[in-house]
Amino acid sequence: ETVMTQSPDSLAVSLGERATINCKSSQSVLHSSNNKNYLGWYQQKPGQPPKLLIYWASTRESGVPDRFSGSGSGTDFTLTISSLQAEDVAVYYCQQYYRTPITFGGGTKVEIK
Amino acid sequence: EVQLVESGGGLVQPGRSLRLSCAASGLTSDDHAMHWVRQAPGKGLEWVSGINWNGDSIGYADSVKGRFTISRDNAQNSLYLQMNSVRAEDTALYYCAKGNGDNPNYYYYAMDVWGQGTTVTVSS
């Protein structure tokens, strides 16, 4: 099983400041045949289902604000919120979908400082 | 707009069975992967199972392998999860989710549409 480890567990950032969430996979999720990283990022607000933000590690889902960006390759990935807004308070999860079982990180809770 | 609506959750005794359903609407085709993902109270997300467009490719989490069965009926735009021999640790909110990939033969994709979930509680 590919273990996804997120850090930190929680993060408090001032409005307008940058938030950075890290995700490390125990095995590479880079597929050599298409050079794609099978890595997604999700946002979950209380009482709501998860929402896809980023897929293929860096492709922003349609309608997602451009303050959200994903980077990284292989085993190390980052989700960056360039200028935190009040509506970004949520738990964020990374996910690998390269191999079965598909696995999620433990989540990072983002709050306003 | 694609919408997914789960149903079939409820209170079930340990060792019994339950069948979850997910009805899809707004889909223009059936050539997409589908998944079940669960979330125990106050916990993170756990992938349960995934299926490609015609059921030829299926995967399960180790925690449910041999007990749960995923299936789909494209004519009915429906996804199912047959849960047998349920345990207390299966207690969770179960989400249905659609894969966003362009190859219908695989389910290895991110999940771009989610339902609101159906709650399963396993208790005597």
Image (spheres, rainbow, N blue to C red):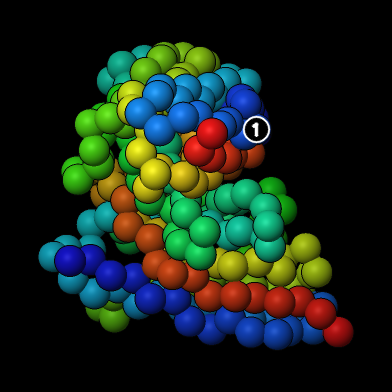
Image coords of residue A65 (percent x, y):
24, 38
The answer to which quarter of the image holds residue A79 is top left
Q: Secondary structure at mark 1?
A: loop
Q: Relative to A9, is A61 on the left or the right?
A: left
Image coords of residue A33 (percent x, y):
32, 18
Q: Residues within 10 Å of mark 1 (few under 14, many from 20)?
A: some
Q: Relative to A34, is A38 on the left or the right?
A: right
The answer to whether residue A55 shows anywhere in this view is no
B78 or B9: which is nearer to us?
B9
The answer to which quarter of the image holds residue A62 is top left
The answer to whether residue A8 shows anywhere in this view is yes
The residue located at (71%, 53%) in the rendering is B63
Image coords of residue B9 (percent x, y):
58, 81
The residue located at (79%, 84%) in the rendering is B13
Badge 1 is on which residue?
A: A9
Q: Relative to A71, is A95 on the left or the right?
A: right
The residue located at (61%, 58%) in the rendering is B39
The answer to which quarter of the image holds residue A12 is top right
